Image (spheres, rainbow, N blue to C red):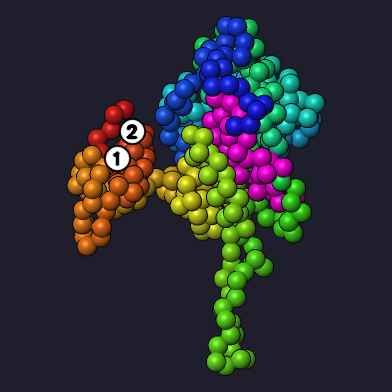
Amino acid sequence: MDNACRTPSKYYAPLAIGAPDPYRTQPVRLERMIHFVPPHNEKIRGKLGDMIKKVDVILGNLEDAIPASEKEAARRGFISMAEAHDYGQTGLWTRINCLNSPWALDDIIEIVSKVGNKVDVIMLPKVEGPWDVHYLDQLLAQLEAAHGVDRPILIHAILETAEGVKNVDAIAAASPRMHGMSLGPADLAASRGMKTTRVGGGHPDYVVVADPGLIESAPRASFQQDLWHYTVGKMVDACMSYGIKPFYGPFGDFSDQQACEAQFRNSFLQGCLGAWSLHPTQIEIAKKVFSPDAEEVAFAQRILEAMPDGTGAVMIDGKMQDDATWKQAKVIVDLARLVADKDPERAAAYGIERCA
């Protein structure tokens, strides 16, 4: 932290008299997919009762993809959908408009004043530095105090500008309200001047080429690379260093489910806990990818059973396991328990008894 940050004694103090105390430990939730819905669309709002049962997070989107003429209708629609349903274990989020837009302030004030006790997380787009988080943090505290909100609304930042990537560590450390971050590849590509119109995923021209063979005229193999590998890794490091959650963002080609699964899986292996689903077909992909494989869970459980206190070293199936692999195994088993509580089929596959 730099000198502009709050001192340790003040870090967890409410920013407004009467506001709820910030969380010292985040609520434990399963968040494999953040499913975006356009709240101004009454037909889609009518399907939410069934959708709530299928997803981990429902997000009412107020920003990109909502026409300027529909911004106020989307805000009203989100408030309506928050009031109309009991979300239970499913998270309720909203993505507000960016802070320099003419709609952001009204988004925040109206949503917190009317349904502040229903909203879990506000997703904040185009975060460029800790100052953006500080502004929303202070405003949320004042509104929570004024309207009797009894638990803090968390902030989830979208990393989608070059300046935001440069300041990623300071953003992660900005507030105890920080829930996590998502990669926003489309806006980030534009901010960086990248030469692609794709929303997430690789690019056929971003490749490495094999060395030439003995026959110079023979075709050389090429392998497509991940444009976002470095940025995802940098975001994951910042999030995990400060105890918040990293997410991959959108994959824009709904017709290419194989590529979507590959991009989600790359981010999962790098440490992301979930991704955005912009289309119903991506919900099952996210469930598949961000739920650990049953064989991995079984092997991880064997490691934990063989090393009950997490120290020492043992051999399992000819492979050495030690303190480091015990930590890896615990990450997998802890995630499997979260999944099992919501997903009876995977609970059976894991051999884990459901708590819920």
Q: Where is residue 126 in the image (x, y as percent from the top left)?
A: 70, 37
Residue name at image x 61 percent, y 29 percent: 174
Q: Which image quarter: residue 62?
A: top right
Residue occupying the far bottom of the picture: 215
Looking at the rendered structure, the kind of residue marked 2 is Asp
Earlier in the chain: of badge 2 and badge 1, it is: 2
Residue that label 1 marks: 347
Res. 123 in view: no
Residue on which the image places disc 2: 341
Query: Considering only vertical position in the picture, is 204 above or below 140?
Result: below
Stretch of the chain drawn in magenta? 163-190
Dot 1: what SS?
helix
Which residue is more in the foreground, 290 or 154? 154
Q: Residues within 10 Å of mark 1 (few under 14, many from 20)?
A: some
Q: In this view, does 187 lie to the left or right of 300?
A: right
* Amino acid found under the numbered disc labelled 1: Ala
